[in-house]
Amino acid sequence: MYMKERNEKKQLAIFSMIAFGLPVIMGLFMWYGYSNNKNLDLFSMAHMYYPAAGAMIALLLSNSNHKLIPKPFFICYLLQTAMMIGISLFSLFSNSEALPQLSGLLMIVGGLLLWLCLLIAKKDRRAAYGLSRKNWKATIWMVALYVILYTARMVVAYAAEGNFSGMLEIFTKSAVWIALLSTLVSYIPLFVPYFGEEYGWRYFFQPILQKRYGSLKGVLILGVLWGLWHLPLNFFFYTSPADGLISVTNQVVVCLTLGIFYAYAYMKTDNIWTVVAMHFLNNNLVPIFSGDLTGESAKGYSITWSMVGMMAILMTICYAWPALTKFFKDRGNLNPTPEHRADTVAYNLENENEQKTATLNQSPAK
């Protein structure tokens, strides 16, 4: 038990250095790019890769069940992360329009390669490292519920601004419905950045924090850290340094409330793909509901403290309610930590092998 706790602490230290260290380092380059009027779109996308990269490196360097690690999947993801970082940094010194195209191609090819790696990985390897696709009925229900809540939030937001008719007008345009359909289809090749966050936050970080601090407190701590993790984006991409503090505060509010619902969904399904799909929808439905299919409205916008207050009320009503449920409060419903999950699969495999050996030994000789 002592060795497991020690190993878990080592994993947490490695994860933290990478998941939170990279944003600090890359944030300095973003500051340079912002100061020199550089396009930082590639930095915002690369940013999403860091949490899973931290989790994977931590597991590769410290987990005792190395034989079960889906190494092709991990290595493929880490190589993509390194290339995304490299392309982002190169964009500071080149105005080539080919870089965004190269980045998009990398995401598509990389996504398809990861699906292939996942497909060829043995069932036990996927189960040991939180990659199993299971509890599909619960997953479909939770994703459907999330879409309903997301739509309700947008309806209330438009109504509060006295522009409900404006939202209805958006959905009278055929281009919007075509964009919605293409967005849903694009999940297959473009899932990687969203997996990048959720595999780090929900699969790796959440169970460890909940184990140490409790079901709700662990999730709240994660929500605050997740919000602050966006800080370079808040100051240099989403808004300007002048509105950076307001933007960071709003980000913490969003991540706290969404974090509760995502935690609930992950606890309900124990399926990381549930929250990956939710995160994908959360980010990609914004252009649909805003009517800005270019996505430009998601960056460089202005924000006020009153907007943060409205967001806090709306997000809390829509997404924080699971914290009041008995299911959420029951520690028996917590997801296993990465170390415990891998150990459980390894133990079950060992027992199965022993039973098979015993059965063979007991078989009468022919």
Image (cartoon, rainbow, N blue to C red):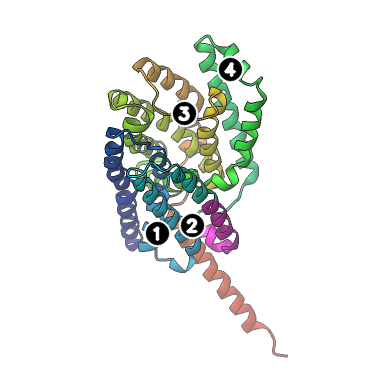
Residue 28: x %, y % from top left: 26, 41
Earlier in the chain: of badge 2 and badge 4, it is 2
Residue 226: x %, y % from top left: 37, 38
Kindly report which numbered mark, 3 or 4, lies closer to the viewer in this rendering: 3
Q: Nearer the viewer, residue 91 or 228?
A: 91
Residue highlighted by disc 2: 129
Q: Amino acid at mark 1?
A: Leu
Residue 122: x %, y % from top left: 58, 64
Q: Amino acid at mark 4?
A: Met
Q: Disc 3 to disc 2, how far (Cα)?
A: 36 Å
Earlier in the chain: of badge 3 and badge 1, it is 1
Say which element carries label 4: helix
Query: Looking at the rendering, in which quadrant would you find the N terminus?
Result: bottom left
Q: Quick check: 31 above or below 173?
A: below
Residue highlighted by disc 4: 167
Kindly report which numbered mark, 3 or 1, lies closer to the viewer in this rendering: 3
Residue highlighted by disc 3: 296
Contact (Cβ within 8 Å) of mark 3 with mark 2: no
Q: Nearer the viewer, residue 72 or 80?
A: 80
Residue 184: x %, y % from top left: 62, 38
Kindly report which numbered mark, 4 or 1, lies closer to the viewer in this rendering: 4
Q: Which residues are magenta?
A: 109-129
Earlier in the chain: of badge 2 and badge 1, it is 1
Q: Is residue 112 left or right of residue 10?
A: right
Q: Disc 3 to disc 1, how far (Cα)?
A: 37 Å
Kindly report which numbered mark, 3 or 2, lies closer to the viewer in this rendering: 3
Q: Disc 4 to disc 1, how far (Cα)?
A: 46 Å
Q: Disc 2 to disc 4, how far (Cα)?
A: 42 Å
Residue highlighted by disc 1: 59
Chief SS of the magenta region: helix
Say which element carries label 2: loop
